[in-house]
Every structure is written in structure tokens, then in C-alpha cells.
Amino acid sequence: MSRRKVSNPLALAVLACLYEKPMHPYEIASTLRERHKDDSIKLNYGSLYSVVESLKGHGLIVDQQTARQGNRPERTVYEVTDAGRLELIDWLSELLCRPVKEFTRFEAGLSLVAVLPPQDVTGLLEERCRRLQVEIEQYRALKKLMATQQIPRLFLIESEYRATLREAELSWTRGLIADIASGTLEGMERWTAFHEKLGKG
């Protein structure tokens, strides 16, 4: 994997916006929110301005103009440089073609699940399933809404991907709950014995 001059995914989104046209940071943030990109990329104004300064410092974007409207503070409009365009295309290409190990919070929890008694884990996983089901239903409702507005699938693919992952996670988690509840999960005897011993201590 390439070592990026600026590695925050928000920088990639900024470059993508400026690839379309020059913008000031407020317009970049509004564009990302309007397109629901903040569902996939963490966005807040403090980090946005830091990212813009970092991109500028590495020569990936430059000031195009600074203007003031009425009593509002001055706003600097930025444009992407040739180096920024190359970085955007290279970085995006890498993200799309190269799978990488991502350390998720759920996977971290699963790796240490034996710390909790089996019955507690079952209850917690059932609650996760309820929350996953709500997320999946929200996506389905969003998809129906977008269909009525005739928004092309191209602009929903990250939401579709996220919903597909959630559906797979829901199915897998339900299977794990069933294995714990039935006692067929390999290692259950040791897990149960460990917590019975703790209870007696």
C-alpha cells in the first residue's frame, strides 16, 4: 500500500469535490452532506479545515481566490492541482482494487467474547441483531425514497454495500446465537466451566 502524504479519507473526499470544480470548505462540506457522503466518511468542520491546510501544504490543492460576501468572513476558494488529480486517481484506484485488513470494533469484541458468560453474550448479540435489523430497514426505506426521486444507483452504491454487509452480519450473528444457545459451539464446555468456576470463587 502506498504511503500517502495525507491519509485521512476526508482528504480523498475533498480532492474529489475539487476535481469537479473549485470550492470553498463550506461548499465542500455542504456538497458531501447533501450527497450523504458523511455516512461513509467522517466529516466535521475542524478536521475539514485541517485536511484542507494539509492538502495545500503538500501542493495537492491551491488557493484560487479569496472573496467576501456582505458581512460574512472571507472565504477562500480552492482548486485541485495536477499533483492532486494524480493523487486522487491513484488513491481511489488503490481503495477499490486492494483489500486490506480493517480492525473493526465488533471483531475486537468477538476476539475477547469468552470474558463474558455465554448467556450474557447471547443477550448482547440479540440486541445487536435488533439494531442491525433497524439499519437494514432504514436502508430499504431510503432505497424506496431514492427510487421515487429517480436517483441513479451509482449514487447509492456505498449505502447498498453497507446494507449488504449488515445483512451478512445479521445472518452470521443469528447463526452464532443459535450455536451458543444449543451448546453446539465448539469450546462451549470450557467456556461454561470457566464461568461456573468464577461464580464459585
Image (tube, grey):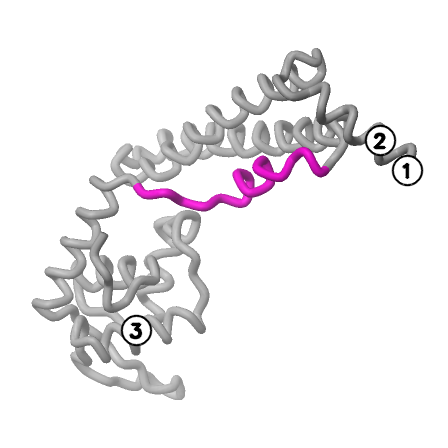
Residue 77 point in image, percent of width and height? 23, 76
Can you tell which of label 2 and label 3 is closer to the viewer?
Answer: 2
Q: Secondary structure at mark 1?
A: loop
* Residue type pointed to by label 3: Val
4 up-or-down from 94: above or below: below
Mark 1 = which residue?
201
Q: As rendered, which of 45 and 102 lies closer to the eye?
A: 102
Instruction: Kindly identify the residue that appears in the image at 43 percent across and 30 percent down.
Output: 165
Mark closest to the chain's N terminus, 2 or 3: 3
Specify the segment rendered in magenta.
100-115
Q: Secondary structure at mark 3?
A: helix
Instruction: Assess disc 3: are there few (<14), some (14-19) or many (≥20) residues with their C-alpha within 10 Å of its C-alpha.
Output: many
- Apparent side of residue 193 relative to residue 147 in the rendered image (left or right): right
Q: Examine the rendered structure and indicate whether residue 173 appears above or below residue 179.
A: below
**Which residue position is annotated with label 2?**
197
Q: Is residue 53 left or right of residue 21?
A: right
Magenta-drawn stretch contains 150: no
What amino acid is labelled 1 in the image? Gly
Q: Residue at x 23, y 41 (%)?
A: 98
Q: Quadrant of the C terminus?
A: top right
Cα distance between the residues tagged 1 and 3? 57 Å
Give x and y (percent) for residue 74.
Answer: 33, 86
Q: Between residues 5 and 23, which one lies in front from this camera angle?
A: 5
Specify the quadrant of the image occupied by residue 85.
bottom left
Disc 2 and disc 3: Cα gap in Å? 56 Å
Front label number (1 vs 3): 1
Are the residues tagged 2 and 1 within 8 Å (C-beta)?
Answer: yes
Give the dominant element type of the magenta stretch: helix, strand or loop: helix
x, y percent for residue 86: 11, 60
SS category of the residue bearing label 2: helix
Q: Which residue is mark 3?
A: 52
